[in-house]
Each structure stands twice: as C-alpha cells, then as structure tokens.
Amino acid sequence: MPDTFKKIAIVTPYYYPLYGGVQEYVYHLKKEYQKLGYDVKVITSRFNDGVSQDEEDVIRIGRGYPITVNGSTGRIILMRDKTEIKKALDENNFDIIHFQEPFVPFLSHEIIKHSGAVNIATFHANFTSNIYYRAGKIFLSPLWKKIHGKIAVSPSAKSSISRYFDGTEIEIIPNGVSTSRFAPAGDKIEKFNDSMINILFTGRIEKRKGLIYLIKAYEKLKKTHSNIRLIVVGRGPLMPQLQKYIKKHAIKDIFFEGFVSTEDLPKYYRTAQIYCSPALFGESFGIVLLEAMAAGVPVVAFNISGYNDVVSNMDDGLLARPRDVHDLSQKLELLITKKPVMLELGARGRIKAKRHAWPEIAKRNLEFYKTIWEKNRCPKKVSV
C-alpha cells in the first residue's frame, strides 16, 4: 500500500475545446499538480471532434451533447462502449479520482461505480431547486456514498447540494484565477484604448446573464455621459434580440466582439475601466468577477447568491439590486464620475484576487486530498 498518492485523475463533463469556468478550473488544477510532480490525467468526453492544448493529458470517453439546465447550456455524456472506462482505470491505476459535478450523466456515474481509488468530488452549481436531484435521489445516493471527500466552490454551491444530500462534511474551497495572466500590466485592445471609459461585459449572451439590464442602464447613462462605451465579449442566442433593441433605441457606442481567444481575453480586461456582470441567478462563484479583479478593474454586479460570495459591496466592488436598472446605473455612475473610488475598488479587488491565485487553490485541494486519503486509502480494487 503506498504511503501517499501520486496518480490523479480529474473527471469532468466539460473540457476544452469548449470554454467555461469548470474547464478553466480543471486545466489550472492539473497544471499546478504537474508542477509539483503529480501524474495527472483529465477524463472527459469528445466535443465535435475538437482537441485541447493539453491533449496528451486527456482521456476522452463517449461524446458530450448539449442540454438546457439551470437556465444555461450544460452537457451530458453518452457512451456506446463502457469498456473504455474499465480500460482507462485498469491502465492508469489512479490513486485519487477528482470528479467535477459528479452527478452530471453519465460518464462520472460509471467511473464512480467502477472506481477503486479514493474519490473526491467538487460541486460547482448554484440553484434553488433541481428536479433531477429531487427525482433521482434514489439512484444518486449510492454514488454519493462512494464519494469519500466532498468540496463546494462557495457557500452558495454548498447550500445547493445540501438541499438534497447531507452537507455536513462538505469542504468549501473556492475557484482560482491566474493573477499573472489577468495582471493589470500588459497589452490592451488598441481600438478601444483611448480617452473613453470602457464598461466591459464577458459571458454567454443568454437570459440568465442579464445583459439587457446592463444595456438599459448604459442607455440611461449615455444620455449624460458621452464619454462611455460598452464592450460585449461573448455570444449566445439573445444577441440578435439585443442588437435589435440597441438599433431601435439608437444607443451609440456598444460593440459586440463575439467570441475572443484565451490570448485576447486578458487584453479586454486591461482595456476596461469598469467590469459589469448583471447575471440574474445560477452563479455559484463568479469567475469572471475574479478575472476582472485580478486585472485591477472595479466590478459592478447584481447582488445574487454566488456573486456576493466573491464581492463585498463598497469594499472590493459594487453590488446592485437584482433586475433594478436604476440601481445598476447609479452604481456604474459612481465609478464613472468618481475616479478615486474606481481606482480604490480596483486595487482592493486585486488584493482579494491574489488570495485566489491557482497555486494557493491547488495547495488547498491537495491538503484536502491528503486528509481524505489518510482516512480512506485501501488496496486498489480491480474495476469490473
């Protein structure tokens, strides 16, 4: 029996070439673990035959298909040949298997069933009700019992899963951010690098993200502040509808940049003077807020569960009443008209972001692994 663990698998229903918060979480944990000498593989599915920049570390099983869940687009993974799971586990003989959102069907379900490793799971989602968990608790409970250590990325995420399962032993370990990649110093987007005050939004353009509220707040502000500009990074199903609204109301200086590369994304943050995310619900943590804070950009967001786990109002950011266009415009105007406040909140946000740097978050995860490993380590079982 080994005295410690060396071989780690991170199982995720979401990974590159798709982009999102869970994907970033998995990638950066893997890279930090590898720097410390651990042998790490990502187990995920195939997505439109795409690959990632670290494909040599990726084991792909089955295929991911999009579904609508919690007001956004999620994925389920279907498999024709489940013997691929047995082969991957037998060949790699992992010590630790770390599942992301382990109850997303069906890849994680099968791996948990066959795992002889110490099983860790991180829960990312924030919801007030989940019909899948409620209806499927009977068949999910055996999987819950096979998970030796449970993590939630925020108090909101912990509260969500605790509605359906015993949450007394769920550890809170937050998401991380690359404080070097999203540093204040560096290249900017030259076409927007002028005397205008840039308000930045990044995210999927869907109802849950609340972009219409930011556009309406910007519309009010533009009438008295000609020196502001709204930059929208992302794409989604509501984009044509929002562009139609902008055209109908003749709102000037709103730019839709669409999808941008991972290389260019930090440049947009550095080019902004204000970052705004008017998401309405379903945010377990708010990685985009942390990215902006790491870049030293003051953030304005709606005061929703998940976001208020990250931002402290009037300390390192501003929180407005959800769906309140007037309050949102007032919070934005405070930064537009009070440059010292803008700079102070940006600096405080940067300090907070440094406490979420990936090396620190990886260290906390590994310490948790060690605690759970010492409680549960046992000779590996051969998968069946």
Image (cartoon, rainbow, N blue to C red):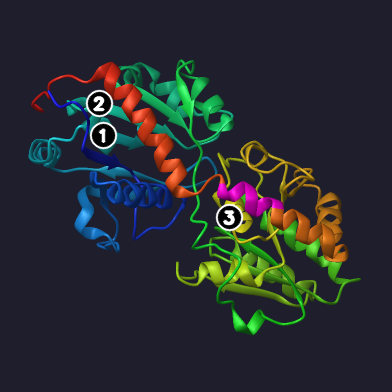
Q: Nearer the viewer, mark 2 or mark 3?
A: 2
Q: Position of residue 129 (x, y in %)?
A: 55, 28
Q: Is residue 351 magenta?
A: yes
**Badge 1 element:** strand
- Can residue 129 be seen here? The reply is yes
- Can residue 299 be seen here? The reply is no
Amino acid marked by disc 3: Glu
Give the side of residue 250 with respect to residue 265, left or right. right
Magenta portion: prevailing SS class: helix
Q: Dot 2: within a 10 Å radius of its alpha carbon, few (fewer than 14), some, or many (20 or more) residues?
A: many
Q: Dot 3: within a 10 Å radius of its alpha carbon, few (fewer than 14), some, or many (20 or more) residues?
A: some
Asked if disc 2 and disc 1 are in contact, CB closer than 8 Å, the reply is yes
Give the side of residue 163 with respect to residue 27, left or right. right
Residue nearest the observer in this picture, 167 or 48: 167
**Residue that badge 2 annotates:** 118
Q: Earlier in the sequence, mark 1 or mark 3?
A: 1
Amino acid marked by disc 1: Ile
Residue at horizontal 24 percent and vertical 46 percent from the top: 37
Amino acid marked by disc 2: Val
Residue nearest the observer in this picture, 25 or 113: 25
Q: Dot 1: within a 10 Å radius of its alpha carbon, few (fewer than 14), some, or many (20 or more) residues?
A: many
**Badge 3 element:** loop
Q: Is residue 304 magenta?
A: no
Q: Position of residue 287 (x, y in %)?
A: 55, 49
Q: Quadrant of residue 137?
A: top left
**Residue that badge 1 annotates:** 97
The region drawn magenta spans: 348-354
Residue at horizontal 59 percent and vertical 77 percent from the top: 188
Point out which mark residue 206 bears: 3
Q: Earlier in the sequence, mark 2 or mark 3?
A: 2
